[in-house]
Amino acid sequence: MNTYLKLPRDGVVFVCDAGRALVLRNEGSATSPSLPVEEEVPAPPNPRAHEQGADRPGRVFNDERRSAVEAVDAHLRNEAVFIESSIERLDGIDRLRPIKALILVAPPRVLFLLRRHLPHRLSALITAELSKDLTKMPILEIERHVLRS
């Protein structure tokens, strides 16, 4: 069964993964959407985790006991920083030209981080979420997946 999401004019589809974010604003109508790219946020270089440091984690001394400290995955930390900066860009776009509705499209782990870090003002605008990685697809394919899924 096909369902059609309605995205009003000035509604935004925010497509994000850990390495790229796209802001697609509906310049058409709810019945005939047109989703040009308003902004593309490329991620800064994020080398593989093993290339970012091979130091062993430190140790903590408590009284007479010694404990290992969990290693921090620099790769995952950089991805989280990118997602947070993408949210800040989306928030800035909304402040310049208000968003009427918001559809989030991201892989499950990224969708979780988006929900966690989105300002309440933007969270209130969410009309749909799609748990898929579509950042590498052409815009027409993204539109097909999101609005005509």
Image: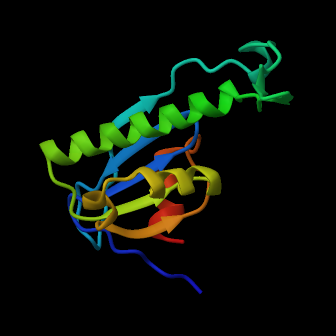
Please tell me which residue lies in front, 93 or 57.
Answer: 57
**Horizontal and vertical percent position of residue 79:** 58, 33
Horizontal side, residue 134 vs residue 122: left or right: right
Residue beneath the point at 21% across and 48% down: 94
Spot occupied by residue 9 in the image (x, y as percentages of width and height):
21, 62
Q: Position of residue 84 (x, y in %)?
A: 43, 39
**From where the camera sits, is residue 84 visible?**
yes
Residue sitting nearer the eye, 87 or 27 = 87
Q: Position of residue 7 (x, y in %)?
A: 31, 68
Q: Name the residue at 76% across, 28% down.
A: 71
Q: Is residue 38 visible?
A: no
Q: Is residue 70 left or right of residue 42?
A: right
Q: Height in image: 138 above or below 26?
A: above
Quadrant occupied by the N terminus: bottom right
Work out whether 140 lies above or below 51: below
Residue at coordinates 81% horizontally, 13% vertically from top-left? Answer: 54
